[in-house]
Amino acid sequence: MSGRRHLLSVGDLGADGLREILRLADSFAEVNTRAIPKVPALRGRTVASLFFEDSTRTRLSFETAAKRLSADTVTFSAGSSSLSKGESLRDTAQTVTAMGVDCVVVRHRSAGAAVALSRWLDAAVINAGDGCHEHPTQALLDCYTIQQRLGGIEGRRVAIVGDIAHSRVARSLVAALQLLDASVTLVAPATLLPPAVEAWGVGLSSNLDDVVPRADVVYLLRLQRERQERALLPSEREFHERFGLSAERARRLADHAIVMHPGPLNRGVEIGAEVPEMTCATISEQVANGVSVRMAALFWLLGVPAGIASPPGAEVSPAPEPASAAEVGGD
Ligand code: ASP
Ligand code: CP
């Protein structure tokens, strides 16, 4: 692997990397409130989205983030690509980067795909979700949202509920929350817990009603049927009754507590149909924060020379106010 920086997993980032990106995200959140939410920080750089699996939020927010940093973007659509002619992941990715790409944002159904690309390509690689393994920028935007709503993460009690076994979101989020000293409880039926979960160092429960009144954050996960190889539940209705956050359960949350979900939602299954519109729910905020956090991640990879991380607490000024719309230019 080259000495180039990548964003492949939360563990690679460590607590310092997480904190640094969260701090950068604050600068970019300010940019996103401007009348022209665009800065020249990555002018001349090119970011490619390589999504071999479907996405709405991650793909669009990376593309929005890159454009707001004045980077050029190229998009690869698996469905209309030469994959259908038998081209491999490696050849596809090398073809795209041969066009002069600085950063590849990749989503793939296989765990390890992003790590493999980081070895093969002469470009920074961001893992936008690899199988059941990791989704580090989702964890970053979730931590940013918790910090924004609750004022901090340390010591907060976070319950992650639902299909943990197939969730890359859960793996990245647990790692991030542990690095930032939150306390995590997983709430799920035994069939939706991953093997060797005891080694994760988290609390376990199968009783959502016990956990809800004591939680600062209830984080709900979709049943990821596309990754389930056999029937793991009697029915969605039964799952909802035991593990779904209905409006009635949400009303038993502490006043300050929040309800999070990475999306896409399956209303009436893991989340009551009306819960996303309740004031405790942060789902739209998570999506909005995703843009600032992904601007921070792109800037961390491409705007700062590798190995020269800004010291904690240092004033970071990646986002100067452009003198005029003309200065930032068009796409
Ligand atoms: N969108 C998230 C992911 O790609 C969560 C989900 O699909 O349920 O992992
Ligand atoms: N949360 C998330 O990753 O959403 P998408 O699958 O729509 O990108």
Image (cartoon, helix red, strand yellow):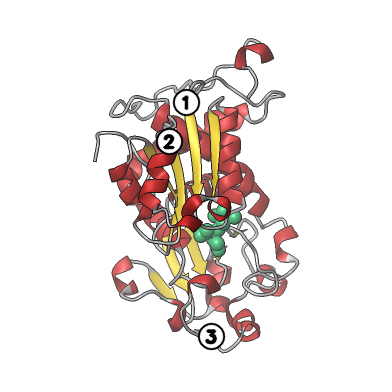
Q: Quadrant of residue 312?
A: top left
Q: Secondary structure at mark 2?
A: strand
User: Cβ–Cβ below 8 Å for labels 2 and 1?
Assistant: yes
Alpha carbon separation for disc pair 1 and 3:
47 Å
Q: Secondary structure at mark 3?
A: loop
Q: Amino acid at mark 1?
A: Arg
How many marks the image carries: the answer is 3
Return the residue at label 3: 233
Expressed as whole percent of the image width and height from the top left, the position of residue 58 reads 56, 48
Mark sitting on residue 45: 1
- The C terminus, quarter of image: top right
User: Cβ–Cβ below 8 Å for labels 1 and 3?
Assistant: no
Return the residue at label 2: 103
Q: Amino acid at mark 3?
A: Leu
Mark sitting on residue 223: none
Answer with left or right where residue 219 lies relative to residue 249.
Answer: left
Q: Quadrant of residue 18?
A: top left
Expressed as whole percent of the image width and height from the top left, the position of residue 38 reads 62, 24
Answer with left or right where residue 95 lies relative to residue 233.
Answer: left
**Label 1 crowd (10 A; few <14 / some 14-19 / many >=20):** some
Which residue is nearer to you in this view: 329 or 36? Answer: 329
User: Cβ–Cβ below 8 Å for labels 3 and 2?
Assistant: no
Q: From this viewpoint, is residue 307 visible? A: yes
Alpha carbon separation for disc pair 2 and 1:
8 Å
Q: Relative to 244, is 19 above or below?
A: above
> Is tag 1's residue or tag 3's residue first in the polypeptide sequence?
1
Expressed as whole percent of the image width and height from the top left, the position of residue 269 reads 65, 75
Expressed as whole percent of the image width and height from the top left, the position of residue 179 reads 35, 51
Q: From this viewpoint, is residue 218 visible? A: no
Answer with left or right where residue 30 lies relative to residue 118.
Answer: right
